[in-house]
Amino acid sequence: MDRLEQEIRDTSKGMTPIVKTITRFAIGIIVIFGAYIILYGHLTPGGGFAGGVILASSYVLLTLAFGKDMALSKMGNTAASILDNSGALAFVVIGLLGFTGGYFFYNFLPKGEQFQLFSAGFIPLLNIAIGVKVTASLFAIFMALSIFGRFIYQAAEGEERESEE
């Protein structure tokens, strides 16, 4: 039995095996949809922010179904921080590359045929940079809030015990 099967059968962490099994299949679909929204954001409604939120929701679902340890094994706090900063740096670098054409955020890549994947110059690159940043940021925020919330809950429990004594 592989590690994932053991995680699904382990009921001490996360939710029931049914939820874990459905999550296992749903996360792939969510990731593909999020990547689609990011890559085709210049042609359809969506873009880097919307796709990043969708990708981050896959990590939230993973955390809720399997527990914090499984989500952190897929993307740790250090990796989230590196991706967050890399996405922001890529966005600024792309903007600065516009100075090759004369001003900040100048579209330095050639425009292709309308309604084709490579038709928007550097906008898809910006969507990817923002998608990476938003995914990592929202994952880090969710993990920080869930860990911080647990500390507040434990502190409140401790105060109740002290007041009862």
Image (cartoon, helix red, strand yellow):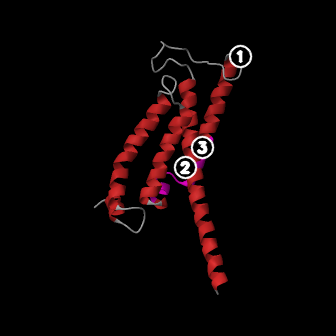
Residue 84's tag is 3
Q: Position of residue 22 (x, y in %)?
A: 34, 51
Alpha-carbon distance for marks 2 and 3? 10 Å
Residue 84 among magenta residues: yes
User: Does residue 40 sit above or below 72 in this rendering?
Assistant: above
Q: Amino acid at mark 3?
A: Asp
Query: In the rendered structure, which disc, 1 or 3, sits on the residue that comes first in sequence?
Result: 3
Q: Amino acid at mark 1?
A: Gly
Residue 102 position, x and y percent, is 71, 16
- Element type where label 1 sits in the image: loop
Q: Residue at x 71, y 19 (%)?
A: 103
Most common secondary structure along the magenta stretch? helix
Q: Quadrant of the C terminus?
A: bottom right
Image quadrant occupied by the N terminus: bottom left
Say whether disc 2 or disc 3 marks the residue closer to the N-terminus.
3
Q: Residue furthest right?
A: 103
Name the kind of residue labelled 2 in the image: Phe
* Residue carrying label 2: 139
Q: Give the percent coordinates (x, y) of residue 70.
A: 44, 58
Residue 147 versus residue 97: which sits nearer the camera? 147
Q: Residue at x 45, y 47 (%)?
A: 58
Cα gap from disc 1 to disc 3, whole angstroms: 28 Å
Front in this rendered view, residue 78 or 43: 43
What is the number of the mark on residue 102?
1
**Secondary structure found at label 2:** helix
Label number found at residue 47: none
- Kindly give the residue lying farthest to the left in the view shown: 1
| Range of residues picked out in magenta | 70-85
Secondary structure state at the residue bearing disc 3:
helix
x 55%, y 39%: residue: 132
Q: Residues within 10 Å of mark 2 (few under 14, many from 20)?
A: many
Total marks placed: 3
